[in-house]
Amino acid sequence: YVVEERKDPESLVSICLATYSQKNTQAPGWITALLPGLVDVLYKKHQGEILLVHRKSQIIAGALIGWDNGHRYYLAGGRLPGEEGASAHSLLMHHAITQAQKHAQAFDFEGSMVPGIANFFQSFGAHPLSFYQLRKFSGWGKWWSLFH
């Protein structure tokens, strides 16, 4: 396996979509609609990178990592199905965490409450933190929020 940094949003989108495909679920629209633009912004600001793991010229796993002064963030990622994909994704996460340590930054997994994903993140030492979400409703949204 080889981990490399490469500005290749098409491969990142493809590997993210492969993850949803292996679960037989519909991928969220933001992956194809917003991810390439986010990659452009992060690269222009020198605050992000795409990490890809490949073997024999086939991309097996990938992730978009962004950062600020104190943190590195796992923003999006995916892998091919099977043990090879799982191993490649673990290698990729290890590489990203090592880069955070090298730059004296904390690594934020941008957690998921999906059991398989949460367990995977926790295997690297991640622990969930709760956050409150505040929303402001106006118009018909106020009435809708009363019943939901």
Image (tube, helix red, strand yellow):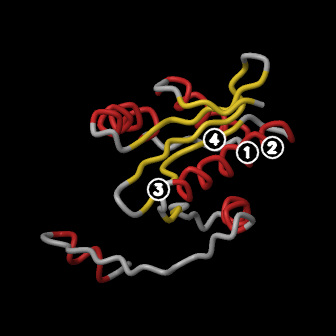
Name which residue lies at 67% across and 43% down.
92
Q: Residues within 10 Å of mark 2 (few under 14, many from 20)?
A: some
Q: Which amino acid is tagged 3? A: Arg
Q: Which residue is mark 3?
A: 72
Q: Quadrant of residue 86?
A: top right
Name which residue lies at 65% across and 50% down.
93
Closest to the observer, 45 or 13: 45
Looking at the picture, does residue 104 appear above or below residue 24?
A: below
**Quarter in which the C terminus is drawn:** bottom left
- In three-dimensional space, the C-alpha distance between marks 4 and 3, rounded to whole angstroms, equals 17 Å
Looking at the picture, does residue 80 appear above or below residue 95?
A: above
Closest to the observer, 126 or 101: 101
Image coordinates for residue 46, horizontal then vertical, percent: 33, 39
Task: Give the SS element for disc 3.
Answer: strand
Comparing labels 4 and 3, the label whose residue is closer to the camera: 3
Task: Give the SS element for disc 4.
Answer: strand
Q: Is residue 79 left or right of residue 72?
A: right
- In three-dimensional space, the C-alpha distance between marks 4 and 2, rounded to whole angstroms, equals 12 Å
Comparing labels 1 and 4, the label whose residue is closer to the camera: 1
Task: Give the SS element for disc 1.
Answer: helix
Closest to the observer, 104 or 90: 104
- In three-dimensional space, the C-alpha distance between marks 3 and 2, rounded to whole angstroms, equals 21 Å
Residue 91 got which mark? 1
Image coordinates for residue 137, horizontal then vertical, percent: 20, 73
User: If you read the primary sequence from the N terminus, does the residue marked by circle 1 or circle 3 appear first?
Assistant: 3
Which residue ends up furthest to the right in the rendered image? 83
Residue 125 got which mark? none
